[in-house]
Image: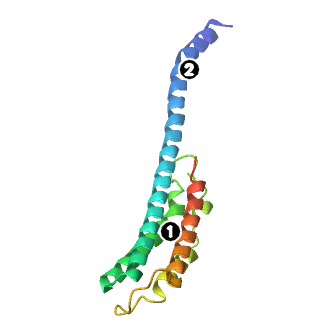
Amino acid sequence: MTPAAVSSLDTFLKVLPSLLVVGGWVVIYRLQAVQSRRKMLREYIEETREAIADLLETALRFHTDTRTVTDGMLLLGKFTDIERRLCMLPRMAQSRWAYPKTIADPSMMVVDLMFLVRLRQAITLDHFDDPLEAPLAFGAPQLGKIASASSRLTLEVDQCHLAAMD
C-alpha cells in the first residue's frame, strides 16, 4: 500500500466511529418516533372505547330515567364525537414523514360505520322523541338491543387496538 492509501484508510477509520454514532442515532430516533406514535394511537383507541362506554351509560340512563331535550342532544353529540374518532383512526395509522410510512396497517384501523349506525338506531328509533313517554323498565328489549349494539361496536374497536400493538 502506498503512503497516501494508508493515510486515507487511517482517516476513514478515525471518522468511522463518529459516522456509526450518527447513523445509529438516526435509526434509534426513527424507531422511537414510530413507537411513540403507536402509543398515541393505542391511547386514542382506548379513549374511543371509553367514549363508547360513556355513550352506553348515557343512553341507558336516558331511557330508564325521566329525560329532557338536553339529554337527547347530549346523546347525539356523543354519537358525533365517536363517529369523528372512528374516521380518524386510519389517518392516525399513517405518517407523512417517518419510516415506515404506516404506524399500523391502515386497513386494519377501519371500523365499519354500520356498527355505529346500528347503535344509533338501537338508541334513537324507539322511545326517543317523546319526552313525556314513561321511562323503560329494567329488562326492556330495547335496552338489550342498545347493550348488544354497543358491545359489537366495542369489539370492532378492539380489533383496531390489536392491530396497533407493537
Question: Which residue occupies 43% across, 77% down?
Answer: 60
Q: Quadrant of the N terminus?
A: top right
Mark 1: amino acid? Cys
- Depth check, front residue: 125 or 96: 125
Vertical relation: 132 (above or below) 42: below
Query: Looking at the image, is mark 2 or mark 1 earlier in the sequence?
Result: 2
**Can you tell which mark lies on residue 87?**
1
x and y percentages locating residue 117 in the rendered image: 53, 79
Dot 1, crowdedness within 10 Å: few (<14), some or many (≥20)? Answer: some
Mark 2: amino acid? Leu
**Based on the displayed image, in which of its 4 quarters is residue 149 positioned?**
bottom right
Vertical relation: 72 (above or below) 38: below
x and y percentages locating residue 92 in the rendered image: 50, 58
**Can you tell which mark lies on residue 16?**
2
x and y percentages locating residue 16 in the rendered image: 56, 20
Residue at the extreme right: 1
